Image (cartoon, rainbow, N blue to C red):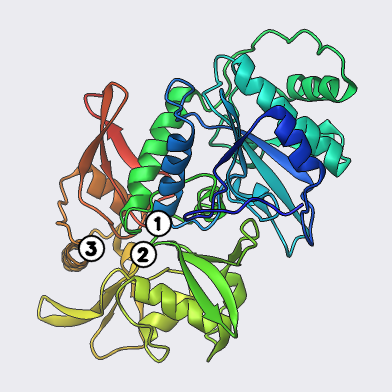
Amino acid sequence: MADFSTEGSPPFINRKLSIAEWQNYVAGYDFGRLKPTRLVLHHTYRPTQAQWRGITTMRGMQRFYAGKGWTSAPHIYTGPDGIWLATPMSQIGIHAGSGNGSLRAGWYSIGLEMVGAFDTARPSAEVWAYAVAVMGELSRRLNIAPRDLISFHRDYTNTKSCPGWAVTKEWVWGEVDAYLRGVAPPAPPPIGPIGTPTPSDEQLLEALLERSFSIKTNGQGYNPDWAFHQYAVEHSLGMPMGPSARITADGVEYNYQPFARDTLYTRIPNWGDVQTLSELLGGSIPPAGLGRALLEATYNAGGSPFRPDWAFHQFAVINRLGPPVGKSAEITVDGKTFGYQAFAVDTLYNLVPNWGDVRLLSALAPAADTPTMRLREALLSATYQQAGTTYRPDWAFHQLARNFAIGAPLSGSFQIKVEQSSYALQVYASTRSLTWCRIGAR
């Protein structure tokens, strides 16, 4: 059967089905050239069931995804009022990072979002009945047993409890199997202890990541369902240095995003098939093609066009220093002139006119002699200034950043509040863990 039409951006069907309507819909559904082979189960966390307002909430989430720059989203939401269709099931959705799948890999998953937060309680009877029907009928339509079809969002990330710690696989598989056989489900097991991360830890981590990822992305922020973000966190690539965007090379369209330690890209719509610019380049600077296009886009995100004949840029590419944070400039210390340029991972400098003798600012961190310390402090001050903030050598954040070599600052120090606690935060480009502290903590 022909699918329902979509509206808005990203394209959502925005139609509610009853269980009987869903059964009829999925039984004759045309998945096209590639059928899904997995279903990834989620909980929305927010909105909760009490916040759910049907089509108003669906369109609100659609606007949220559009603000993130997404062109796809989860496929299905089960609320207390019915089964809501979002991204068409024949399209690869964005909902579970590497669990999204891709055309190139030859598989993809259906993303099912249950409305509510289920770390300490299971879904309501209404939400769960609709969810079981979705899983059961997809299992029947695809001829894949529940335990082979259904996975959890937390299977693809260690930063999420999704679909909630109260939801366990044996329980889900047993319920869906009973639905398919038309028998009463087994008695549910008692709800076990909360795992790691705890809800409070998960909320803090997501708040920190959201604010940190927003600095250089025009407010796109962080979303663990986006494969680029999941990959960047799991592989310690640091902060994004620009928003997710599109580029065309040799007639093929790609999505890409520059991070401090690498630029990630994927051919559209292979959302789960994340690839890295560093692997594509292999330490070389190509004259044309996808690698060169991504390299130039990465540097443009940093506000400094790529110059393949510049020693700084050659060194930065080979050593994976990420995009520039500012333009090349000069500074005079103790009567000597130095050229320098701040990159995400480190600041490069040389003594003028020794252009080929490229040095790393991070190598000056342990300096004890006065002239070298003056050079280090001057370069740090210039790096912070290029990043739009001021270097304070007596501040704990700045001392730690220097000692940990976590790259250029992307912001000044600011505060956020999560639940009832306030935190001081400063974002650095190549940090492997966020630099923050709880205000009032000892």
Give the residue displayed 46% in from the left and 62% down from the top: 261
Q: Gap in Å between the C-alphas at discs 3 and 1? A: 14 Å
Residue linked to disc 2: 344
The image shows a total of numbered marks equal to: 3
Give the residue displayed 52% in from the left and 58% down from the top: 71
Residue 29 lies, in percent from the top left, at 77, 48
- Residue 337 or residue 252, whichever sits in front: 252
Q: Gap in Å between the C-alphas at discs 2 and 1? A: 6 Å
Residue 46 lies, in percent from the top left, at 45, 30
- Vertical position of residue 178 compared to residue 211: above or below: above
Residue linked to disc 3: 387
Name the amino acid type tagged 3: Ala
Residue 137 lies, in percent from the top left, at 79, 34
Give the residue displayed 15% in from the left and 81% down from the top: 336
- Residue 99 or residue 412, whichever sits in front: 99
Give the residue displayed 34% in from the left and 82% down from the top: 305
Callout 2 touching callout 1 (CB < 8 Å):
yes
Tell me the quadrant of the picture where the C terminus can be found: top left
Horizontal side of 263 relative to 357 (left or right) equals: right
- Residue 63 or residue 195, whichever sits in front: 63
Residue linked to disc 1: 430
